[in-house]
Image (cartoon, helix red, strand yellow):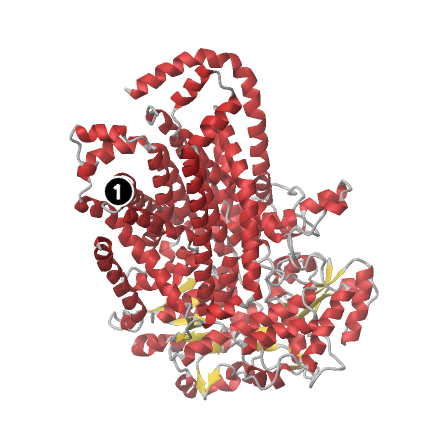
Amino acid sequence: MMKRVKLFPFFSLLLLMVISVIGCSNKSATDPVEGSEASEEVTIDFAIHVANPKDQEPAFYQTVEKFMEENPDITINLQGTDQQEHIRNIKMKSQSNALPDIFWMLPASAQELEEAGQLLDLTPFFDNNPELVEKFHMNMFETYQIDGKQYGMPYQPLVTGFWYNEALFDQYNVDLPETYEDLTEAVKVFEENDVVSIAKGARDPYSVWAFLTMLSRYGYFDKIDVIVEGEESFNNDDFLKFYEKIDELRELGAFPANITTQSYFQAVETFMTGEAALLDAGIWEAKKIEESKLANDVGFWWGPTFDDGVGNQNLSSIVPAAPLVVGKHVEDDQAKYEAVMKFLQFYYSEDGAQIMLDNQVPPMIVFDGEIDEEKHPVFAKVVEQMNRTDWKSQPNQPDLVVSESIANALYDSIYGVMNGIYTPEEALDIVANRISGQ
Amino acid sequence: MHWLSKKRYICFMLLPTLLVYSAYIILPIIIASYYSLTRFSGIGVPEFIGLENYQALLQDPFFWVSLKNTVIVLGVTLIVLIPSAFFLALLLNRDVKGSNVLKALNFAPAVIAPILVGLIWVFILDPDMGFVNVFLQKIGLEQLAFQWIGGTTLTPYSVGVVESWRILGFIATIFLAGLATIPREIYEASDIDGANRVQKLIFITIPMLNETFKINVILIITFCFKIFETVLQLTNGGPNHLSEVLVTYMYNVTFISGEYGYGMAVAVVTLLITIVFTALFIGLSKKRVEKKGV
Amino acid sequence: MNQTMTQRQENQNLGKLEKSKTKSKIWSYVPIYAITFIVMLPFLWMILLSFKSNSEILTSPFSLPASLNLENYRSAIATLDLLLMYKNTIIIAVITVVVVIIITFMSSFALSRMVFKSGKLKGGLYYFLLLGLAIPPFILLFPIYRITIMFDLMNTHASLILPYIATSISFNTLLFMGFLKGFPKELEEAAIIDGCNLFTLCKSVVLPIIIPVIATIFIFNILYVWNEFPFAVTLISSDSLTTVPLGISEFKGRWNIDYGGIIAATVLVMIPQLIFYGFFQKYIIAGMTAGAVKG
């Protein structure tokens, strides 16, 4: 009896705290509104997905610096955090109504934020700046729209495919592949000569870009909407062919022996040292390749075409990367709103595009920027591929149009076959089960 | 003591700890338990779904793999760490030249950033290019060159060894503190009785360290159920989640796949399993002491 | 009084010890140096790696560095504001540790020494306080973030100090209780008969006896705070509050990892910790003579 009396107030206090914390998310909405009264000085909180933007995202960092230089009354307070922690932090902030003014977010989560009503509608801004819209590559512009509402803009374009080491192809007298059959022939030769055909590291499961484009060559974008709605199964004959191809590549010895313990970074390094013929990656490695001894031997390839594929096989991959989005609260502060819009205007202008180009990030807008081909031969080669008119980009990257959970199942399924852990059928079921579980 | 133990005093002594502890540990557990009953991605409003997450958990093969791996890690760590840390502490406890430096050096692995623990041990254990297998092949023992990490079976054993290496100095330090509390007079008395080194160890040191052993075992149990960074850096749970432990799996579900509600269900179950293991140990060790004591 | 007694006995024993010294010396030296070497091997190798370029680290980790390349250290020092990080970390660590040791000593003293009306409540509270040992920090992040916002503590030192105190409570309770149980109560009883109050009892009688335990706890609490990452990265978003463990992530980008920088930064961050440990662990043993009580 005694005990109960003692414990009762303690636990009721606890309960009270639980209720207040769970319930307080709406109460704390009274964000401190800074800046509006303090003359014209405005500070924008900008949260970004790397801890050290200056070194890790130089194109972005320099754009911000340049913008602040041109607008001395606006300060951008960069909050850099490593990607996983950044996403976690944004989610927590969204629950406490404490989102930063502008931030980078994964596509699926950005859409959820929009559906929860936490993002600013950018439509009026683009309505007022039609000249900006005209210049955009349309798939860059339209990706982050729901019901005609623009809730985000791509941070950068995402250009992915295979880097190849031409010197190795020459050395072993192998033609540069175009079709899947060419690729398997090349793999056989490299395997005989102890060269890794495709550098890969399963410790970073997301590193499957070129293979995602291959999945698109089996009709991914024709089907994925109905599959997610449950009207068709991910486990279908077309997709099965895709996984069987991976399985065949594995049997031929296309992947490194220690694929399961390698990280993406180690895979890159084996390519850079000339131990691997192909590297599944993207344009972001251009700078590194240029600085390596491979600089003059490297080319860029969109990946193999399949004669049993579905639809256009000449699919390249120039898609919008994850978006930049603006917190809804920004509209409550006129000065801040204007500063953020000014920034967006600059970021997507030709000046902004040129800064990106100087840092070997291709532009999102139609624009004849200058590329110094002598200084940046590797980057120029990618741009050359991007400009080919006989190749058309997939509308998006397959993992970016589904939830993070399904995207991760997709990575697992592809690496599962490469690792030899899953049969093609099991791999299909991994994704199918994840979709039906939601 | 009795007359200093007024209720007022007791409350005063306990209150600060209980307050901070309740707000920052107990309250979050309750909140996490609430989320484990919802479908929630971390954004928007959680949808209450009752025990659905827990039902899904029972049928989730990856969860059972993680549990099995965690128990293996715990077993390996207990078997390797308790004797070796105790032995190390005995050696460090002697008056050896430079013992302060030696103690610090043995403690060094405990303060290396986990990302580096992963990097270093991948170079050692990698089946293809790792130091161990390259060495074994050089001396003609290819048949012993197993797939230490990255395969389907051995990873948790390797994790147990790496973890033991990492916290050896930590556990040994606690043994040292225990050794420091044994009154010297006891040893001196046994000298007079003519006891030798081994006898002293068995009849004085080990029984006197009963509490310290218990503390260390509890620490290792709870520690192994929280293992995270080492696995993340060594294999990232791979290939295909087969080397996942409970906390890495929970992390993966919660933060990588964005299934916060389900992740919290994994977390709550992990917590309960840890409590059961620890309680079993405490119960067992109590029984043993009672038997011996009477 | 006790101290002089043990010292006298030590002197008496010195002669006896002298004879077996040479033999036991070799006995103690060889194994401990061998073990230390094995434990240190991966660590020494890490120092070697810190002189290599990033690509050398990944492709030829076992070779000796071509030259004594200090580039990694240079970039680590250039990237990190080490002074600021140390300053913030030390402020947070010291406040945390002082507070948590005082409050957990108080609660452990109450639970191990004071008389409760209900023994069950006492035992229950003890296990209740141990619960925290079993909790991975990731469960706590989300709720603690909200509590921090609720108390309006974002981007203050206190936002980290409070969770660090809370997460240290269980560990400290386990150690304090474990060791307090083992200490004889005679001294305290004598002190109470002399008319000591609670405060002097704790301060002058109990505290000196448990110096080795406090030293152990002190070391571990400090090192915990020094290396803690999940809370730091969640609750600190202002550069001026950045702490040591956050430094490592500065070298990790989305598409690249500067392992050389990470290794160099780790070495720079570790050295103060090892010096700290080497210095303070002496008190674990130093307590021995102070705590020599008749068993």
- As drawn, C44 above or below A21: above
Mark 1 secondary-structure assignment: helix
Q: Is residue C264 visible?
A: yes
Name the amino acid type tagged 1. Answer: Ala
Task: Give the percent coordinates (x, y) of residue B274.
Answer: 45, 53
Quarter of the figure with residue A304:
bottom right
Chain at numbered mark 1: C
Report the number of numbered marks. 1
Q: Residue at x 62, y 50 (%)?
A: B122
Task: Give the percent coordinates (x, y) of residue A103.
Answer: 43, 70
Task: Give the percent coordinates (x, y) of residue B273.
Answer: 46, 56
Q: Residue furthest front?
A: B294
Task: Give the percent coordinates (x, y) of residue B175.
Answer: 45, 35
Quarter of the figure with residue C14:
top left
Find disc 1 in the rendering and name its residue. C110
Which is more toward the observer, A390 or A31? A31
Which is more toward the observer, C36 or A350? C36
